[in-house]
Image: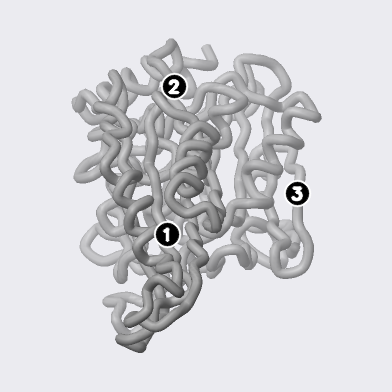
Amino acid sequence: MTRFSFGEEASLPDTTDPVALTQMLIREPSVSPDTGAAQALLAAVLEQMGFKVWHLAFGEGKEKTFNFFARRGDKGPHICFAGHTDVVPPGKEELWTHLPYAAHIADGVLYGRGACDMKGGIAAFVAAASRMGEGGPGSVSLLITGDEEGRATYGTQKVLEWMAQEGHIPDYCVVGEPTNPLAIGDMIKNGRRGSLNAHIVVEGVQGHVAYPHRADNPVHRLLALLGELTARPLDEGSEWFEASSLQVTSMDVGNTATNVIPAKAEARLNIRFNNLHTGAELARWITTVCQKHAPQSHADIHISGESFLTPPGAETRALISAIRQVTGRDPKQDTGGGTSDARFIARYCPAVEFGLVGASIHQVDEHTSVQDLETLTQIYHIFLKEVLA
């Protein structure tokens, strides 16, 4: 991966200015899992601020993923910020009002791929850490991955394993995902549901529809097992979570003939589950139902993350206090939505998510307001002062 020393190659931006830092990152395209020069530039900025940076690459060939861990200070309390420099593709650039990597500002709005998801969040935290200055109490770190938008196999999970081996597990982690629906201060994600994907294949015996006794129709067996799976209410929700949900996402037979019983039928489903379940428990249930209705079936099950919950503690209360001080809002603590790398971090330490407004993520003309970048920086700054004091 490219290394930068600021001087001849590039000029050091004002590290207390989240807008300049966001523009710097947006202007370096980094479509997942290609980090481009974005990580190298960010690491160089942090080194100039007194951070020690470890560049951590995992995987081989096309799966090789570049990440880094940076830390300033070696004492506790240790607060970590987790983020990703990779972004989703911009799509057709001609559909954008402003080019996706130009980082153009118009009427107080900064446009660009990654503006809110999540190069802007990274920039706000770096600016907050810069405003803290060096030599303060405790320590601050950043866990930055280049594969959050992709499979996430060789990203945050691997960095956390390295952090555990090297003694860098923090006391608390803030993941800078864009959690706010409409305005900064709307919402903190203090947990997430788990996610399970299943690909079910039912084998049958092909035959003529006029002679069904000579065949074994896999479609009927598939319908029966899906019927049992979808008929069961998984739960009614819990204190912090909504009810778990099983959704069939596809069924495929591949049969174009009207007079042929097919030899195979398959389906895919997803379960978003709360803290009343584990992925292993749900996987066993699916397998049992499949064998009951179709002994020749096979279920390929992948658990992309378990549910997690970070109960309110001193650090979360400090974050809420900082949000109130800057915005006057009382943020909702919520566990809805999709998954993030917080699902991996929560295995090691308490983790919450809080970042920019996420209304435009993954869309054409992704954007964030200049004021929101400053507001988020102020919140992170106050939070760091309170928890590190």
Question: Residue 40: image x %, image y %?
Answer: 67, 57
Do labels 1 and 3 touch, CB within 8 Å? no
Task: Indicate which label's residue lies in the foreground, 2 or 3.
Answer: 2
Q: Tag on residue 268?
A: 1
Picture quadrant where residue 90 is located: bottom left
Question: Residue 165: image x %, image y %?
Answer: 80, 29
Identify residue type, mark 1: Arg
Determine the CA span between mark 2 and mark 3. Answer: 29 Å
Determine the CA span between mark 2 and mark 1. Answer: 31 Å
Above or below — where is 323 with respect to 225? above
Judging by the rendered image, the residue that carries numbered circle 3 is 55
| Residue at disc 2, secondary structure | loop
Above or below — where is 311 with respect to 10? above
User: Which residue lies at the image location 50% right of the left edge and 62% below the top edge?
Assistant: 201
Question: Residue 355: image x %, image y %?
Answer: 38, 40
Task: Indicate which label's residue lies in the foreground, 1 or 3.
Answer: 1
Task: Indicate which label's residue lies in the foreground, 2 or 1.
Answer: 1
Position of 281 compared to 71: left or right? left
Query: Closest to the observer: 91 or 191?
Result: 191
Residue 157 visible in image: yes
User: Which residue lies at the image location 75% right of the left edge and 49% below the top edge?
Assistant: 55
| Residue at disc 1, secondary structure | strand
Label 2 neighbourhood size at 10 Å, few (<14), some (14-19), many (20+)?
some
